[in-house]
């Protein structure tokens, strides 16, 4: 039967690495004045082509290109993969976002390592950091390339560093390919203090702790922080001629003044100038720093409310 196939066509098909050809059936026998026609069926077994990660792009929620991420915000990572025998054989796609010093092989951690995965038509990843409803895979898997979108968010403690990597690994049914881009993670700090007002009791001329000790300064940061304090003069509400200067306020991280040796950071007298109370406080989430506040009560002193501002600056 194969002798019915033109030799040149047969060679061309072989050159294209098409594995097999076959006749559809015997030649038709037609009336003498008619014409002859033949058809063949081609069964193509194309060899696999390896996938290729063509492009990795990041945008914010407004669709703007970015190369640095704010912790806590949602971003889209778009990974374009090409495959010459179409992307229909892409089995899975892994996106890893990690701080380079921690390394690709590190286990997932909110501070330095996030792994996301697409496979079997669904997305997976750390629940708190993957926005599944905004992820998407290519609509048409019969194309030569397609773009997967991973919607992700990094934790607020994701390390402040210019040395992060977004790595994409695409795997078809036989081979794997990867691509990567470098990104930065921006600085993140938030802080609050409680209580918002303080009360004290004691005799004029004495140095007394405030009733609310210890004050709680709570902060979240993705890098080591410095705490600086600064105070205004506190003016009497009823009799403004009575006031408390910032030097009346003494801060410490333990409840004793003048102990020897000093426990942890030394006590600090407040000033109108910003002064460092502690530097190199560790990064982390919702870290509570206890502060003890004492007041030197002037003599004479008047029993009333005093208004002023103490600034606690974390940077
Ligand atoms: Ca392939
Ligand atoms: Ca002390
Ligand atoms: Ca201390």
Image (cartoon, rainbow, N blue to C red):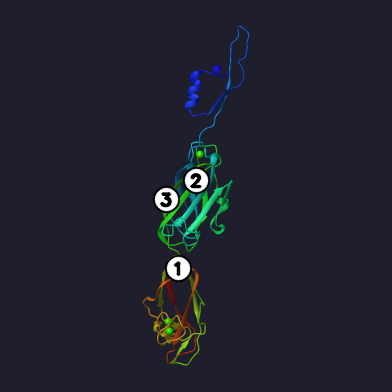
The numbered mark at residue 170 is 2
Q: Which residue in the protein does label 1 denote?
A: 283
Which residue is drawn at the image coordinates 51% and 22% (left, top)? 10
> From the image, which quarter does the C terminus lie in?
bottom left
Q: How far apart are marks 1 and 2 (CA)?
A: 34 Å
Q: Taking the image as four quarters, which one is ligand 3 found in? A: bottom left
Q: Which of marks 3 and 1 is nearer the N terminus?
A: 3
Q: Earlier in the sequence, mark 3 or mark 2?
A: 2
Which residue is drawn at the image coordinates 43% and 75% (left, top)? 311
> Looking at the picture, does residue 204 appear above or below residue 123?
below
Crowd band around label 2 with a 10 angstrom C-alpha radius: few (<14), some (14–19), many (20+)? many
* Frontmost residue, 195 versus 163: 163
Q: Does the residue labelled 3 lie within 8 Å of ligand 1?
A: no
Q: Is mark 2 on a helix, strand or loop?
A: strand
How far across and how far down the image is residue 271, in percent?
Answer: 38, 80
Q: Distance between the residues labelled 3 and 1?
A: 26 Å
Q: Earlier in the sequence, mark 1 or mark 2?
A: 2
Q: Which residue in the protein does label 3 denote?
A: 181
How far across and how far down the image is residue 107, in percent?
Answer: 50, 59
How far across and how far down the image is residue 224, in percent?
Answer: 42, 68
Q: Distance between the residues labelled 3 and 2?
A: 15 Å
Label 3 with label 1: CB-CB less than 8 Å: no
Q: What element carries label 3?
A: strand
The numbered mark at residue 202 is none
């Amino acid at each position: 039967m194969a002798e019915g196939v033109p030799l040149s066509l047969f060679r061309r098909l072989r050159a294209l690495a098409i594995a097999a050809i076959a006749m559809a059936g015997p030649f038709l026998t037609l009336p003498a004045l008619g014409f002859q026609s033949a058809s063949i069926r081609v069964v193509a077994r194309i060899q696999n082509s390896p996938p290729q990660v063509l492009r990795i792009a990041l945008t914010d929620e407004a669709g703007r290109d970015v190369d640095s991420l704010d912790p806590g915000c949602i971003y889209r990572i778009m990974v374009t993969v090409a495959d010459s025998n179409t992307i229909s054989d892409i089995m899975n796609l892994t996106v890893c976002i990690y701080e380079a010093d921690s390394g690709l092989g590190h286990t997932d951690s909110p501070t330095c390592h996030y792994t996301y995965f697409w496979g079997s038509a669904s997305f997976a990843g750390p629940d708190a950091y993957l926005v599944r409803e905004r992820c998407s895979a290519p609509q048409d898997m019969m194309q030569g390339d397609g773009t997967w979108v991973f919607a992700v968010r990094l934790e607020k403690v994701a390390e402040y560093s210019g040395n992060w990597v977004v790595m994409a690994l695409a795997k078809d049914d036989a081979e794997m390919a990867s691509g990567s881009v470098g990104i930065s993670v921006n600085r993140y700090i938030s802080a609050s203090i409680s209580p918002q007002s303080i009360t004290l009791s004691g005799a004029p001329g004495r140095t007394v702790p405030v009733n609310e000790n210890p004050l709680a300064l709570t902060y979240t940061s993705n890098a080591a922080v410095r705490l600086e304090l600064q105070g205004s003069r506190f003016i009497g509400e009823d009799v403004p001629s009575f006031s408390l200067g910032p030097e009346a306020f003494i801060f410490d991280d333990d409840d004793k003044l003048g102990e020897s040796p000093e426990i942890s950071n030394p006590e600090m007298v407040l000033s109108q100038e910003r002064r460092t109370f502690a530097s190199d406080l560790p990064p982390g989430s919702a870290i509570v720093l206890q502060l003890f506040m004492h007041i030197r009560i002037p003599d004479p002193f008047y029993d009333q409310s005093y208004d002023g501002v103490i600034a606690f600056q974390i940077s």
